[in-house]
Image (spheres, rainbow, N blue to C red):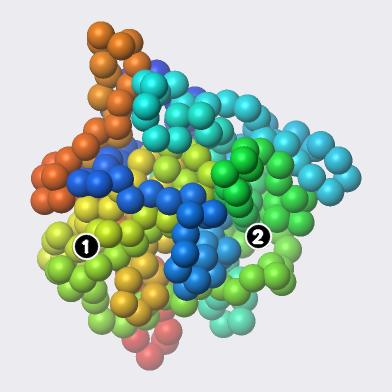
Amino acid sequence: MNFSLALLAAVFTVNFSTMAIDKVVYGEDNRLDQFEVTDQNKLDAQMSTLAMIPKSKLTKKTENTYLADDSKIELCDGERFNKQVDVADCSGFLVEKDNKQYVVTAGHCMTSKADCYDNFWVFDYSKKSPKDDARTILEKNVYSCKRIVAQRLGRTSGEDFAVIELNREVTDRKPLEYRKRDEIQKGEQVYVIGHPSGLPSKVADGAFVRKANEWFSFSTNLDTFSGNSGSAVFNEKTGLVEGILVRGDQDYNYNPRKQCYEANNCHMNGCGGEDVFRITRILFLRDPVQD
């Protein structure tokens, strides 16, 4: 777990309350834009994920659209996605409990009523084609946080989740299915969908569970970055959401010769791993028969 705020301040403009926690690339960088994804199941899942974007970064463009700020990550030439906009602070995903919809995210992304009020929750902040800059967002895909239903952020326990209610019902996409009993095992394959470094939505697969012996979380080698906090982590075999991406290793290293930042690369079994909070540990989402 790395709280390198100095590095984050140099690379991103991040609301401190979200406490964006570093992540990293393991082995080959497997992140894909929406237009590059060929697996229909993953495309369907991507439809039900959201970006948490500060209201200050979206401007009303027309009656039916918003325009995202043209802010970009200051990375070295040749770094992937260095020309893409980076307006998201966190990620989240849509679920359903007792016929009511909720968005699940990391607890450090939603710590106060101010976090609820100051941010939009946005579907389809993604690149639909190579030329799409992802800045134009349809108004129908922009939601507000109505209230925080449940939230935990435990420094010692490792709890890190939030469940929020949106300002209106989502009618054009399905909530994600999530694990409700038992536990994922070491070695099982996983993938993640979210907004690394605040970028348009990315799907990253080719990863597996490295450790699964902790009560609240398990460790993976997913390619994730700050901004991925709150991302849905899926079981590759079942398609179920296994948990919430919450923390990991250092994102970027400073190159003093080039005077810019480069992505931190680790071996598949190296560095500290990317931690995922188990969705089965969110009591609010559990079925009564489980308790």
Cβ atoms under marks 1 and 2 closer than 8 Å = no
- Viewer can see residue 153: no
- What's the amino acid at mark 2? Leu
> Which quadrant of the figure contains the C terminus?
bottom left
Question: Where does residue 65 sit, x and y in percent of width and height?
Answer: 79, 45
Query: For the residues carrying marks 1 and 2, which lies nearer the camera in this image?
Result: 1
Label 1: how many Cα within 10 Å (few below 14, some 14–19, many 20+): many
- What's the amino acid at mark 1? Phe
Nearest the viewer among 96 and 269 is 269
- Assign a secondary structure to mark 1: strand
Question: Where does residue 144 sit, x and y in percent of width and height?
Answer: 68, 51
Question: Where does residue 264 sit, x and y in percent of width and height?
Answer: 24, 33
Nearest the viewer among 55 and 250 is 250
Nearest the viewer among 114 and 126 is 126
Q: Which residue is mark 1?
A: 208
What numbered label is drawn on residue 166? 2
Q: Is residue 226 above or below residue 211?
A: above
91 displayed left or right of 78: right
Q: Is residue 280 above or below residue 276?
A: below
Residue at x-position 38% and y-position 39%: 226
- Viewer can see residue 101: yes
Q: Give the image quarter of residue 2.
A: top left
Residue at x-position 26% and y-position 16%: 255
187 displayed left or right of 104: left
90 displayed left or right of 62: left
Residue at x-position 42% and y-position 55%: 203
- Assign a secondary structure to mark 2: strand
Question: Where does residue 247 sit, x and y in percent of width and height?
Answer: 30, 46
